[in-house]
Structures are given as C-alpha cells and as structure tokens.
Image (spheres, grey):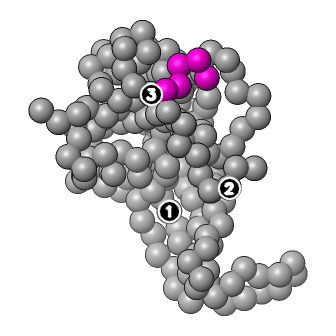
Amino acid sequence: MPNHVVVIGSINVDSILHIQRLPQPGETIKMDTFSQAAGGKGANQAVAAARSGAKTSFIGRVGDDANAAFMRGELVKNQIDTQYVATTVGTQTGQAYILLQASGQNSIIIQHGANFEVTPADVQRAADLIQSADFVVAEFETPVGATAEAFKIAKAAGKMTILNPAPAQKDLPAALLKNVDLIAPNETRK
C-alpha cells in the first residue's frame, strides 16, 4: 500500500520570465520568453509526492478567479485529493513571478493571495485526513499558525512531519518547532 502524504501549503500560478540576466537598478531589459505553469511550494511538493506513487491530499486555498480553476485542474490531473482546497471569495489565487536567467539562476517574487487565508480552522476540518496520513508536509507560503495546527494534529496521531522553512521567517513559535521531525531548507535562507 502506498504512503499517504498530506501537504498543507501554497497554490500559485507561476509566471516565468525568461531573461538573459537581472536588470541593474533603473535599467530596462527585454524578456526572451514568457510562460505560465502550476506552482507554489506546497503544490509542487504534492505533485512530487503523487508522481512518486504516494496517495496525496492537499489542504490550502485558492481565490475565486480563473487561476483557481486552472490550479484545481492541475492538482486533480496529478491525482491529488483536493477535498480540503477551499475557495476564498474576493481574493486572488496565489501567484509567483519567476525571473529565470539564462544561467539557470532564478529570483522569485510571490503574491500570497488566498494562500495567506489558510487558517487553523481549515486544518481542524481536515483533522481526520491528517490523522490518516503517513507524512504531513508544509512550508511557509501559508500562515505559520495553520502549519502549527497541522503538525500538532499529526504528532498527536504519531505521524511524521516535514517542514520546508521557506521563505525564511524569524521567531518561529515553539509550538511549531516541537512538532517538526525533519527540516528541508532551501539553498538561501535570509
């Protein structure tokens, strides 16, 4: 039987700007190409888990816009359970603007949108799902309070928790850290 992974995290539409290099202050440069794709640290983690053969479920939020339908479709296409992906009316689905240089280096600007509307109450509604998981995975593109609640439920049920601490944050609550089993940081942690 495959492992069950529950991800609480971000759902973003990635707008990718392919450029030769970053512009200097005050400089305008041309973009080589533009593309859009499904993204968000949480959604990417869920897709990776599903593609590796894990049963995968997602807890998160989208806005009430066209990007929400696109992202829900991408998650479902990758066989991810979206029962606990809620819609926040009057808010945009999260977006990421990725400056991808010819060298392969990238810089990312995110607009949280509905991702920052995920609440501990959203997580509590999914408590049975979390308790049935083998692994619970999260990052910091959603509120820390929601992640802390998910990890509290997971640890009380004896589940493994994995945290990608990006984007980096200061002064993390002890209530979160005491329930983290594995930390998987990014290359840059500022």
Is residue 91 part of the magenta span, yes or no?
A: no
In this rendering, which labeled residue sits more in front, label 3 or label 1?
A: 3
Query: Disc 3 marks which amino acid?
Result: Thr
Is residue 180 part of the magenta span, yes or no?
A: yes
Q: Position of residue 132 (x, y in %)?
A: 27, 19
Q: Earlier in the sequence, mark 2 or mark 1?
A: 1
The residue shown at (87%, 81%) is 26
Residue 31, compared with residue 187, is above or below; it is below
The residue shown at (61%, 74%) is 105
> Seen in the image, is 57 located left or right of residue 138?
left
Asked where in the image residue 158 lies, by quadrant, the reply is: top left
Span colored in magenta: 177-181
> Seen in the image, is 105 located left or right of residue 124?
right
Asked where in the image residue 130 lies, by quadrant, the reply is: top left
Q: Secondary structure at mark 3?
A: strand
Rounded to the nearest angstrom, the CA distance separating label 2 from label 1 is 20 Å
| Residues at discs 3 and 1 in contact (Cβ within 8 Å) | no
Rounded to the nearest angstrom, the CA distance separating label 3 from label 2 is 22 Å
The answer to whether residue 59 is seen in the rendering is no
The residue shown at (29%, 25%) is 133
Observer-nearest of 33 and 114: 33
Q: Position of residue 6 (x, y in %)?
A: 35, 32
The residue where tag 3 is placed is 161
Quadrant of the drawing holding the N terminus: top left
Labelled disc at residue 188: 2
Residue 163, compared with residue 53, is above or below; it is above
